[in-house]
Image (cartoon, coloured by chain):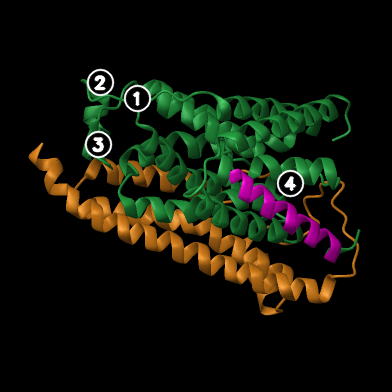
Chain colours: A green, B orange
Amino acid sequence: MSVLLFTIIVLVGAFLAGLVGSLTGLGGGVIIIPLLTLALGVDIHYAIGASIISVIATSSGSAAAYVKEGITNIRIGMFLEVATTISAIIGAVVTVYINPGYIAVIFGLILLFSAAMMVRQKVDRSDNDTSGKLAVFLKLNGTYPTADGVKKYAVHNVIGGFLMMFIAGIISGLLGIGSGALKVIAMDNIMRIPFKVSTTTSNFMMGVTAAASAIVYLHRGQIDPGIAMPVTVGVLLGATIGSKILVKTKTDKLKVVFAVVVTFLALQMIYNGLSGRL
Amino acid sequence: MSKENKNFFADKDIQVILGTLLRVGVISSMTVVFIGGLIYLFFNHSNLIDYAKFDSGKSGLSSIGAIFSGLKAMDGAAIIQFGTLLLIFTPIARVVFSIFSFLIERDYLYVLIGLVVLSIILYSLSDKLVG
């Protein structure tokens, strides 16, 4: 395949990945990696390197908008970044020593999990009850603007959330994705932070986490300009347009359709990984 | 409680500057990637791609030094890689800025937490982790 044809195909694919990724909240990386590996025969290590760059671009771009609205809890973000940067670097260092087949299998499993998380009913368990001593010490409890004025919330189980973030960081460094689904578990279910705050804060953290592992990938030569260029430009454009559409449309049906597609991709990744074709 | 209220406005200003910093970082790095991409395509469009097997030495652009020497030669791939580097440094610049803003707020606990995050990232920049 010529460089020009490859660039065009990846550009279009990455644009769609970014568009759908932002509409469904799944992120672009989880779609671009199967596209590069399954459809275009790119080695998974290159796909991971390109994907992590697109994660930095989309998360920094949308964090720029969220941060100004004052929803993001910068203290929670900074504190949890201690866990995610250490573990993202560990993941990025380890990934090259693992058989590409196993990486594909892990990727498929995370994809299945993310699809399930996407369609599940979300229950907001946030409250303003007394939180632990650690949350008070770290000044994590905060406020956020809602339709009925500024609302207070308390942060629970800081240690549990920190450990879950550590796992999310390892997965992020290992697979080159933002691992938003795992970050949501840590923040929504364990620390019981309100949705709006947890989505924007996890997005805020993603850039730094991804940058930490991207440096390791860069030194190792996993970031190839010929792949990273169309992936980053495509995903960022798609995600930007997606976030503009998102305000006006309901995405429930799209999520179900997309969950089916993602499940199919996940099974393909697992099958190809196990049969040694990736 | 009154302390939280006092910090609120300061936080708000910081959030606006943070947002602008991130936006400028993303836009400028993507512009560089795009320009580099055009130069890269102009000279390489009919070459054949070869990404089937990962080879760590192939791109030759895996260190900051190599990227800068490629930049001098106006090499498209090196310009893309430089844009990528700018993008990687955008969230890192955000951490540095946050540390200063916590310093202004006299929130020394978070100055410390920020410094921990920054030193983890700087450690990975030191190139010791990839054998």
Q: Residue at x 64, y 44 (%)?
A: A29
Q: Return the chain for callout 2.
A: A
Query: Rounded to the nearest whole Å, what is the CA distance between mark 4 and mark 3?
Result: 38 Å
Residue matched to label 2: A132
Residue matched to label 4: A47
Residue matched to label 3: A142
Q: Return the chain for callout 4.
A: A
Q: Quadrant of the C terminus of chain A?
A: top right
Which of marks 4 and 2 precedes in the sequence? 4
Q: Residue at x 60, y 59 (%)?
A: A237
The secondary structure type at the circle numbered 4 is: helix
Residue matched to label 1: A158
Q: Nearer the viewer, mark 2 or mark 3?
A: 3
Q: Tag 1: Cα neighbours inside 10 Å, few (<14), some, or many (≥20)? A: many
Q: Nearer the viewer, residue A213 or A113?
A: A113
Q: Amino acid at mark 3?
A: Gly
A223, above or below A112, in the image:
below
Indicate yes or no whether the magenta region holds residue A29. no
Q: Return the chain for callout 3.
A: A
Q: Position of residue A192 (x, y in %)?
A: 36, 24
